[in-house]
Amino acid sequence: MTIKTVATRPVDGQKPGTSGLRKKTDVFMTPGYLENYVQAIFEGVGGIAGKTLVVGGDGRFFNDRAIQTILKMAAASGAARLIVGQNGLFSTPAASNVIRKRGAFGGLILSASHNPGGLHGDFGLKFNMANGGPANEAVTAEIFARTKSIAEYAIFDAPDVDLSALGETMIGDSAIEVVDPVTDYAELMETLFDFDLISAMFRDGFTMRFDAMHAATGPYAKAILEERLGAAPGTVVNAVPLPDFGGGHPDPNPIYAKELYDLMAGPDAPDMGAASDGDGDRNIVIGRGAVVTPSDSLAMIAASAHLAKGYTRGLSGVARSMPTSAAVDRVAEKLGIACYETPTGWKFFGNLLDTGMITLCGEESAGTGSDHVREKDGLWAVLMWLNIQAARKETIAEIQTAHWAEFGRTFYTRHDYEAVDSEAAGGLMAHLRSRLSVLPGTTAAGLEIASADDFAYADPVDGSLTTGQGIRIGFASGERLVFRLSGTGTEGATIRVYIEKFEPDPARHGEDAQVALAGVIAAAEALAGIASRTGRTAPDVVT
Ligand code: VG1
Ligand code: CO
């Protein structure tokens, strides 16, 4: 086996977005494309010689090939040890856990998350640091800089490693350790939640459906929910990870997980419905006839987390991404703890978690997590909800109604316009940005605007400043609108419009969110001119 040095040239557009680099799979498969980016990562993080790295992905098409390339390149760059999930699989939160548990220098996670897979689908790669979390802005900037100056990469000319067998092999001087991806994660969950209490609830007849969407969480959910907690066999559906996610779109939203939403709204609904996304970091929780919005889920978990054994000491603080609703702010206020507002993307929670300033955090995009790892964690949220139901001896619908009665309800919806012409989307945002100073005091669809700004975040730990994170419009009567462009898409631009309104009156808590928010939705159209600028008269996805 010898190390080959291959001459290469920079490829345009290898700029990491909200969560690493995401591109069409066939772009990633272009000879040299993956190699360039991997070499840029190794150099951008300051070299990996003598270091331990964790490697794994969500099992999508090209996962297996890409991992072989990464292993051979890491060995050529002198990595001491590569810890790989069996068959190349790791859910994102499980990879984060292994990085932390094994004291690794970092990890490479292969995933395009909730985006569809396949040759014409999407692929992604990101680097996580020693804390287990996504590389921060300074590191991703360094990686991007390397993609622009790269001239060569190094790779071992070696046969593929058999990733189906547990155990250790070598590429040159680098140990390749193939581990079971579930064991460490399941152990961690057992330290955080009352497995006996949850098992007893299942024994007493509690029913559930967990839709793994043929993605990374299947094996974890089977092992934990069915095997350890005693949920009925068949509780976990679509449990086998497939390279094309069974032809589906592994996003647990009302469009792509429609079957689950329909089941939970119908007469045969089990006590709880749940699903996660391609790489297992997102979650959705649905009670019988009661969908819990991710923003509300964060608030409700914050209010009850002390009932789970890993959190009995209470919460040090909480954080939410800026577009996430203010429901959790009201819980934090009552608990007398700090609530931080960060830009979109889990990397911005890292410093707050590392310094113990927060225990819990979440995003409106179906992400919830805590200081147990440095990624959002789908199955963790599901277990938290199981634990809370078992401890409170209440259904999800009861918990939700009681929460709204105590804190008020924050009606919330997000409207996505996908694969919009990039220029039209950029024009829409530029137009809004240009009017920020003149908007306050004017009205939009009859609502008086009180504030308008472009969100910027000064990290309270390292002082780094992140600007241009989304247009916020606050109305005099308390409603809020946010406009931003997605940083994870691979086709044109995706415009996200986030819409919320606080409602203290319990008599109105049962209203449909789209109805309750109709006035604010009209204001969004009046302000941004979405229809005239993009030609779209309705969003592609409503969450
Ligand atoms: C989206 C979500 C964001 C999330 C990110 C990664 O980003 O809005 O909240 O952190 O995806 O999640 P964007 O830039 O497209 O809005 V995942 O599960 O795709 O790793
Ligand atoms: Co994800």
Image (spheres, grey):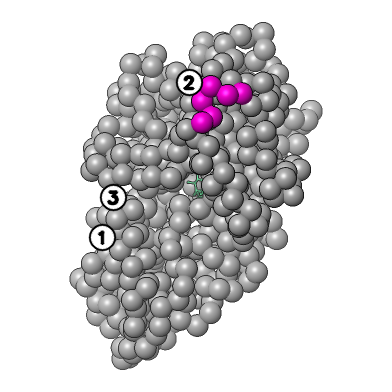
Answer above or below: position of 46 versus 230: below
Please tell me how crowded label 3 is: few (under 14), some (14-19), or many (20+) other residues with Cα within 10 Å.
many
Q: Which quadrant would residue 171 be assigned to in this image?
A: bottom left
Q: Please provide percent x and percent y for residue 96.
A: 37, 52
**Residue 318 in view (yes/no):** yes
> Residue at 32% across / 24% down in the picture?
338
- Ligand 2 contact, mark 2 (Cβ < 8 Å): no
In terms of secondary structure, where does tag 2 sit?
A: helix
Task: Name the residue at 20% across, 71% down.
Answer: 50
Q: How far, Cα to Cα, is label 2 from label 1?
A: 38 Å
Question: SS for tag 3?
Answer: loop
At label 3, which amino acid type do we have?
Answer: Asn
Please name the residue that numbered disc 2 is placed on: 391
* Magenta extent: 438-443
Q: Which residue is mark 3?
A: 131
Q: Is residue 130 left or right of residue 273?
A: left
Let me know if residue 202 appears in the view. Answer: no
Q: Is residue 148 magenta?
A: no
Q: Nearer the viewer, residue 192 or 469?
A: 469
Above or below, comparing residue 10 to residue 330 in the picture: below
